[in-house]
Amino acid sequence: MLKGIISDRKIAAIYARVSTRKQEEGISLTQQTGEMLHYATGVEAEVPASYRFREQVSGYSEIRECYDEIRELVRSGAITMLIVYSSDRHTRDPIHGEVFRNELRRAGVELHIVSEGGRVDIETAMGQFMRRQFDNFNWFWGEMIKKTMLDKKRAYTAAGIPYVGGFAKFGLERMGEKQTAYVVIVPDEADV
């Protein structure tokens, strides 16, 4: 009888991801985590503190330390569901998405995507087909973001404006906004 009670428990891991520090201004790791924990409460899933993963890494990257830890939880049978905020936070690589969903499916682990309303179908042919389409869109959208940023850098350079995006490197400080941005040397740091 005790075995049945334990096996009915919903144990989840959550995974929050951003690619850059600047994304913290959008849907930050803290916001994603809060949304996923709220969702987990609604579906009566337990999320142990050690199963709450957050990392800053590209969705294209095959090397994601937290993701590897989640994959080990899947293989060991420690979780019954994985909760992510959105499909692009999960992955932007269609091949990686396919491999990881196969691992989830083989282990009987449900995939829940908060921005899509909850549990997504990774079992049926139609569900697998739809997840592949999401992966392809996420890959395409990521490529368009990269192209836009490159075009922006080229336009600034062609206009004779030094492109200073994000944070300045150590020893420099960013001044001004957008087209008037420039960097100045910070003497104390530059000496280092």
Image (cartoon, helix red, strand yellow):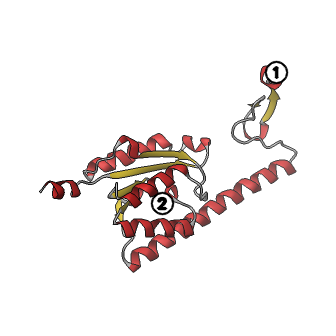
- Amino acid type at image mark 2: Ser
136 sits to left or right of 82: right
7 sits to left or right of 71: left
State the residue lying farthest toward the left.
Answer: 1
- Residue visible at 40% across and 42% down in the picture: 50
Circle 2: element type = helix
**Residue 96 on image: x %, y %:** 54, 65
Query: In this view of the protein, which residue sits in the foreground, 101 or 134?
Result: 101
Q: Which mark is residue 187?
A: 1
Mark 2 burial class by Cα count in 10 Å: few <14, some 14-19, many 20+: some
- Residue visible at 31% across and 50% down in the picture: 40
State the residue lying farthest toward the top.
Answer: 188
91 is higher (above) or lower (below) than 165: below
Q: Residue 87 carries which label?
A: 2
- Residue visible at 82% across and 25% down in the picture: 190
In the rendered image, the quadrant that contains the N terminus is bottom left
Query: In this view of the protein, which residue sits in the foreground, 131 or 184?
Result: 131
Residue 160 sits in quarter = top right
**Residue 174 on image: x %, y %:** 75, 32
